[in-house]
Amino acid sequence: LQAQGKVNDVYDTCSAILTELGESIPESYTLCKSSEMLAETLKMYEELGDKWLKGEKTDDKTLQTTLQFYNVIVLASYFCKSYSMVAYFTCKAMQLSLQRGLCDHTPLALIQFTTVLNKDENAMLCYRIAKDAMSLRERFDVAAQIPELYFNFYGRIAWRFEPFQAGIEHLRRGFEAGLSSGHADMGLYCLLHTIKFVLFSSPSLKSTLKEIDYYLHLLKTYKSAEVKNFMLNLRETVSVLIDKEDA
């Protein structure tokens, strides 16, 4: 459903399942409440710290299922709900894992939390927390989550502190992993950030244009109107810059 752009259906399905699992899904959430919840969740994380990160993997199947659906509803919420609702879901997922233990879906929940928390004034803190999340990859089965992990970490957090080329390489891997694993939608989101970073860092506008054309060709197979429109806008921008450069 997500790949087909049916984010409202994704949201409704996840909401129904989470309710069945005993979770509370509010109709709306205020900005004030979401700010308080973010601060409360961050405090919980900092109090538990390394002890929690180094804890054993829990065999709580209900926790794993609940976090999995929270992680999905977070992405859907970006497109069909308010920032406050996105913050609510990320905090709920984080608090559950902080209270009940680590599982395969904890790394993504932790990174999603940092993307909502992230602001100019606390960017370094969020980068540190996101790196903690990425360090859990070696201990947990996150192979199927690589597109989401790379999209959030390299595309939304690490770009402030790591070379663009490193981000480009990992985002390309996320794109490839998404296509090969049946998660084309997340792979295409990785692609969006790949092209942005290439534009910022490439010494050759003409090579950037060729890369955009290659991806536009791929989009004939892996259809996404959102990604295609973004690519076409970027292509127009690059073409204008090339014309000015050649003038």
Image (cartoon, rainbow, N blue to C red):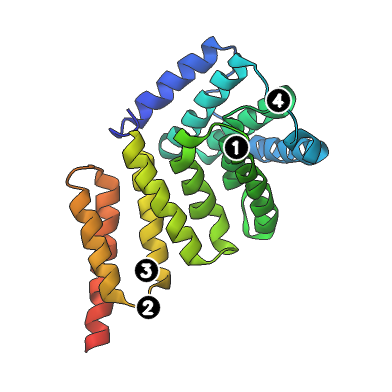
Q: Is residue 191 left or right of residue 141?
A: left
Decide which of tag 1 and tag 2 comes sooner along the chain.
1
- CB under 8 Å between discs 4 and 3: no
How far apart are the two marked residues, 4 and 1, measured between alpha carbons?
A: 12 Å
First in residue order: circle 3 vs circle 1: 1
Disc 1 element? helix
Q: Is residue 148 above or below residue 169?
A: above
Residue 81 seen by the camera: no
Find residue 155 and report its horizontal and vertical position in percent. Answer: 48, 54
Q: Return the residue nearer the eye: 131 or 155.
A: 131
State the residue in front, 101 or 82: 101
Q: Which residue is mark 3?
A: 199
Q: Earlier in the sequence, mark 4 or mark 1?
A: 4
Residue ID for mark 1: 107
Looking at the rendered structure, which numbered label has been put on residue 203?
2
Kindly identify the amino acid type of the residue bearing the numbered disc 1. Answer: Pro
Q: CA distance from mark 4 to mark 3?
A: 41 Å
Which residue: 64% across, 49% down?
131
Which mark is first along the chain, 3 or 4? 4
Q: Is residue 244 left or right of residue 18?
A: left
Give whichever of 109, 226 is nearer the camera: 109
> Residue, x 25% and y 84% (percent of image)?
244
Residue 29, located in which quarter of the rendered image?
Answer: top right
User: Which is more N-terminal, label 2 or label 4?
Assistant: 4
Foreground: disc 4 or disc 3: 4
The Cα–Cα distance between marks 1 and 2, rounded to whole angstroms, is 35 Å
Residue in view at x 62 percent, y 27 percent: 103
Q: Is residue 203 visible?
A: yes
Please state which amino acid type lies under the numbered disc 2.
Pro
Expressed as whole percent of the image width and height from the top left, the position of residue 165 reads 46, 65
C-alpha distance separating marks 3 and 2: 9 Å
Amino acid at pointer 4: Gly
